[in-house]
Amino acid sequence: MRVLIVDDEYLARALLREFLGAHPDVEIVGECANGFEAVKAIGELDPEVVFLDIQMPKLDGFEVVELAGSKPHYIFATAYDQFALRAFEVHAIDYLLKPFSRERLGQALEHARSRQTPPAQLQAAVAEAAQRHGYLERVLIKDGTRVHVVPALSIDYIEAQDDYVQVTSAGKAWLKNQRMSELEAQLDPQVFIRIHRSYIVNVGSIARIEPTSKDNYCAVLKDGVKLPISRSGYQKVRELMR
């Protein structure tokens, strides 16, 4: 079993390395101290299992999964249990709450070998539903080997393009491999409005609403960009901009 260890704390990596040393079928192929290193290592080293801390500088564990993809199996390790539900939402094999014992690590490895999420852990995760994560504070966009981190509030508008979305901020645009409806659900509805089936706009970026014809309108942004508004979108804009 090819394993990658990702944790920003050296002692945490050392302890995990020690615990894993007792399992002869485990090969540690690398260690990473932050999320950017992890994304690169997952692509280059092709591990089967990634032990992944959640709270790390630069990129957190969930952002690593978003960028690196679901090919490896993830076992999250964290000192905070409020992340449990979200861990299973991104298809974690298991969830280790620090500090964990050798025996608990052994159970997680068994789950990885069988590729099954333990039902008891899943039930515990569902119990954390009241503590679900909030709206996105930043949007991650992978561009080849580069990663763009775009603060959500800096986004002016988002345009649907088939299975992609184009995210525009301060005159710059990036393509992100994500469906419009999925991204819309992750954004704060008090800030971002779906004004058209193809457009989401930041209310703070709107300079004015102009009629284009009878019963038809467009949103004119502060940089002069004009976006079409559907009838349902017009009602949303009116309500939020009152």
Image (cartoon, grey):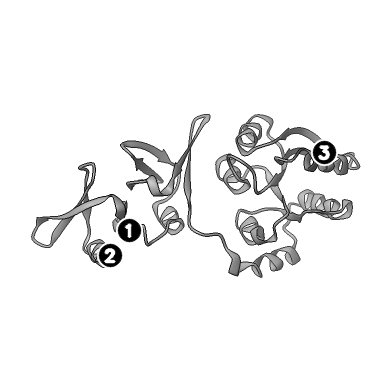
Instruction: Name the residue that disc number 2 marks.
Output: 236
Quarter of the figure with the C terminus: bottom left
In the displayed orientation, state which residue is furthest to the left: 214
On residue 206, the disc is none
In terms of secondary structure, where does tag 1 sit? strand
Q: State yes or no: discs 1 and 2 in contact (Cβ < 8 Å).
A: yes
Amino acid, disc 1? Ile
Determine the secondary structure under disc 3.
helix
Residue type indicated by callout 2: Lys
User: Which residue has dot 1 on it?
Assistant: 193
The percent position of residue 199, horizontal first and vertical second, equals 30, 51
Whether tag 3 and tag 2 are in contact, CB under 8 A, the answer is no
**Residue topped by disc 3:** 14
Which image quadrant: the N terminus? top right
Q: Position of residue 241 (x, y in %)?
A: 26, 63
Residue at screen point 86% across, 53% down: 101
N-terminal of the pair, mark 3 or mark 2, is: 3
Point out the tag, 3 or 1, that comes first from the N-terminus.
3
The relative height of residue 135 versus residue 128 in the rendered view (above or below) is above
Q: Position of residue 21 (x, y in %)?
A: 88, 39
Residue 204 vertical position relative to residue 18 in the rendered view, above or below? below
How far is mark 3 from mark 1, CA to CA?
47 Å
Closer to the camera, 121 or 238?
Answer: 238
Q: Nearer the viewer, mark 3 or mark 1?
A: 3
Mark 3: amino acid:
Ala
Mark 1, Cα crowd under 10 Å, few <14 / some 14-19 / many 20+, is: many
Q: Is residue 1 visible?
A: no
In the displayed structure image, the side of residue 116 where residue 58 appears, left or right: left
